[in-house]
Image (spheres, helix red, strand yellow):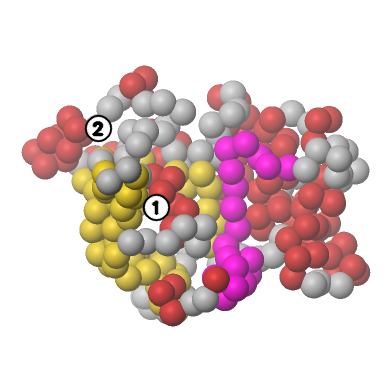
Amino acid sequence: MQNKKTLINIAGLSKNYNTDGTTTHALKNIDLKISQGDYVTIQGPSGGGKSTLLSIIGLLDKASNGDYQISGVSVAQLSGSQMAKVRNREIGFIFQDFNLIGDMTVSQNIELPLIYRGVDKSTRKIKVAEVLKRVNMSERAKHLPNQLSGGQQQRVAVARALVGNPTLLLADEPTGNLDSVNGDSVMQLLSELNAQGVTICMVTHDSRYAHFSKRSIHLFDGEVVKNTSVQEDKSSTTIETREVAELLPTPTQVGA
């Protein structure tokens, strides 16, 4: 079987913050590869570096050290404007807080990334209709965000992330503000999208939702302490896995 294309290739990546003469090591020597069609979850306790890593992958922040390549291009070689262009064309974002604009309709919210790209109006209309159908929200196209449930708003946010046909979909705690029913619904949608070929990298503190993915990475104090396929994670009984598990908090100990 032919190997899948590597979309994200991170080697020796570190992120440090210097405040009042004190250095905080948010990420330490991270190695990570994400291939086309992969579905990776990043787990770990609050303050462990999950969102920091996702921000760097999404070109919202820069690493202090190490190499990061996206689609074979080294991020270190990109200017600020080039990074913005890659971010707009290659990456779709889903946030915990939905980030929808309240006085714009569902369709208008989804359309925004295409407007930023300069896509013509007729093409925008077609693409918006396509992704609305894909997330089962066609009947809500003219609604405002405050007329939708939390689960529906997150589906709109997913559609907005997908409308530009990104290479990679990044989700930061996409179920964090949802009840279990709506959370399960959004996770099922992400699984369906991955089955259709969408590459996903998701931060979650909920171990239940990690089992929707193909591969799970655990961060603890900025370091990768575990990197396994979900099936390996479910069945593993090795001493090493048990020792790592003892480092990680239970779901009830982890903050949102």
Q: Is residue 197 covered in magenta?
A: no
Q: Which mark is residue 248?
A: 2
Tell me the crowding category of disc 2: few under 14, some 14 to 19, or many 20 or more residues within 10 angstroms, Cα based: some
Question: What is the secondary structure assignment of the residue under circle 2?
Answer: loop
Is residue 29 placed above or below 105 in the rendered structure? below
Task: Give the quadrant of the N terminus.
Answer: bottom left
Q: In this image, 247 relative to 38: left or right?
A: left
Q: Are marks 2 and 1 in contact (CB under 8 Å)?
A: no
Q: In this image, 238 relative to 245: left or right?
A: left
Between the residue at mark 2 and the residue at mark 1, the CA separation in whole angstroms equals: 18 Å
Residue shown at 60% from the left, 28% from the top: 178
Residue shown at 44% from the left, 79% from the top: 77
Q: Where does residue 242 sit, x and y in percent of width and height?
A: 15, 35
Q: In this image, 36 relative to 68: left or right?
A: right
Task: Give the extent of the magenta segment.
Answer: 81-100
Circle nearer the N terminus (2, 1): 1
In which quadrant of the rendered view does residue 123 lie?
bottom right
For this rendering, which residue is in front, 177 or 36?
Answer: 177
- Mark 2 against mark 1, which lies toward the viewer? 1
Tell me the crowding category of disc 1: few under 14, some 14 to 19, or many 20 or more residues within 10 angstroms, Cα based: many
Q: Where does residue 91 sit, x and y in percent of width and height?
A: 57, 62
For this rendering, which residue is in front, 137 or 89?
Answer: 89
Q: Amino acid at mark 1?
A: Leu
Q: Which residue is mark 1?
A: 53
